[in-house]
Amino acid sequence: MATGRFISFLFRSLIILVIFLIAIATVSALISTKPQLEIDTGQRTLPAVVVIEAKPTPVERRTIGYGTAAPLQHADVPARISSTVEALPATTRIGRFVNKGDLIVALDPTDYRQQVIRAEQALASSVAEQAILAVEQDAANTRAELAAQDQILAEAECARIEDAFARGGAKQREVDAAKQRLIGVSSAAINAKETADQLPAREEQAFSTLTSREADLELARQSLHRCNILSPIDGVLQEIDVRVGEHVQAGQRIARVVNSAMLEIPLRLPSHARSYISIGNDVSLRSAGFGRRHWEARVSRIAPEDDTQTRTMIVYVDIEQDANSSTRVPPGLFVRGEVKHSHDVQSRWIVPRRSLRDDRILVVRDGILRSVPVIIEYSITAQKQQFDLPDQDWAVLETPLSRDDLVVVDPGGSLRDGMAVRVILANEVALK
């Protein structure tokens, strides 16, 4: 019995010893494989900043301006007569393409048809009156000729009777009767000539009346024709301002048609850029709003005067495009234009736009931050691979830097002039 208890105690002690040895081995393994903490040398406690090495870079001068695309061909179509809208064709819908001469709006033509009828009748009366005057002219000329011949005969007869009276072959009353007849014939001849002489003036007056009536008829027909308001250009309907049954006045706009095949973009640039700008310069356009769409064009015209209030000049960019293309420049789009000066390529100091704070940049000199005031000459939009940064917007500095300067890429609010920092080159960040 005592021997059994001793064996049981010995077995239990052996198990406890094995467990204890396993625990010691496990702790030893954990201690041997634990991560080693880096020794703090003091440099790791400094704030880290990402920097680029300042160096002059060949840069093509560029000037940035803004403008709104406007169609060269557009028409605010007015009503040229006063009437009531009778019909809008099925094709008269905003966004529909219309050809030059297509019907946009039909106005009520009833009153203008009656005006045409009245003008035609008045013209017919004038034509008939002119024909009557022509007949009267011929008759008056004939009567005047006959009266002149009758006057010649009466004068001859009066002369014979006076001669006979002088020889005693005629009486005084015969002489008086001959003179009286001569006076009557002469008066009739004068009246006939007066009537004949008046008829050319009357014919001229009738011709003027006829011409006026023809003009009235043409105007009446034009007014009737203007009841159908047609598109003056090829383009797309932008707006329809009237509805069926609405009364419109002459001169009132009823529709707007826009042709976006030819666009004009007036870009406002700083006045000082005039010495660098020339016709034919390449222009890179992009939408100033959402989408960041891009187009390439050229400067086609330059305004001669500067705007004294805004201190800007205007250059015009003309774009010819497919009006149905999905990549076209839509009229009314506000765009950002970057004019490139290929003849002006020089080495200049450039920094990312995000490195600027209140016209200052932070540079690291001997491990210490220095705030440097700078003057920006102009801005450019491009990818600069030599700096190992993804930035597209860069500032070209008029202020020179030192080749040993390290420019802080993105100065945060906690960085101050005179701070000691730990620098990380941008290419090292790119490799990570």
Image (spheres, rainbow, N blue to C red):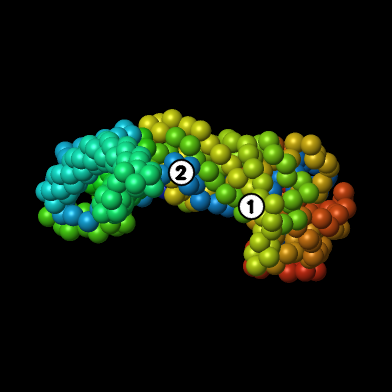
Whether residue 7 can be seen here: no
Q: Residue 210 appears in which quarter of the rendering? A: top left
Residue under pointer 1 = 314
The residue lying at 67 percent from left, 46 percent from top is 302
Q: Residues within 10 Å of mark 2 (few under 14, many from 20)?
A: many
User: In the figure, is residue 365 to the left or right of 180?
Assistant: right
Is residue 99 or residue 67 the one in the foreground? 99
Q: Position of residue 298 (x, y in %)?
A: 62, 37
Q: Position of residue 177 (x, y in %)?
A: 26, 52
Quadrant of the image containing the C terminus:
top right
Amino acid under disc 2: Pro
Q: Residue 388 appears in which quarter of the rendering? A: top right
Residue under pointer 2 = 71
Farthest-out residue, front: 168
User: In the figure, is residue 143 to the left or right of 293?
Assistant: left
Q: CA distance from mark 2 to mark 1?
A: 17 Å
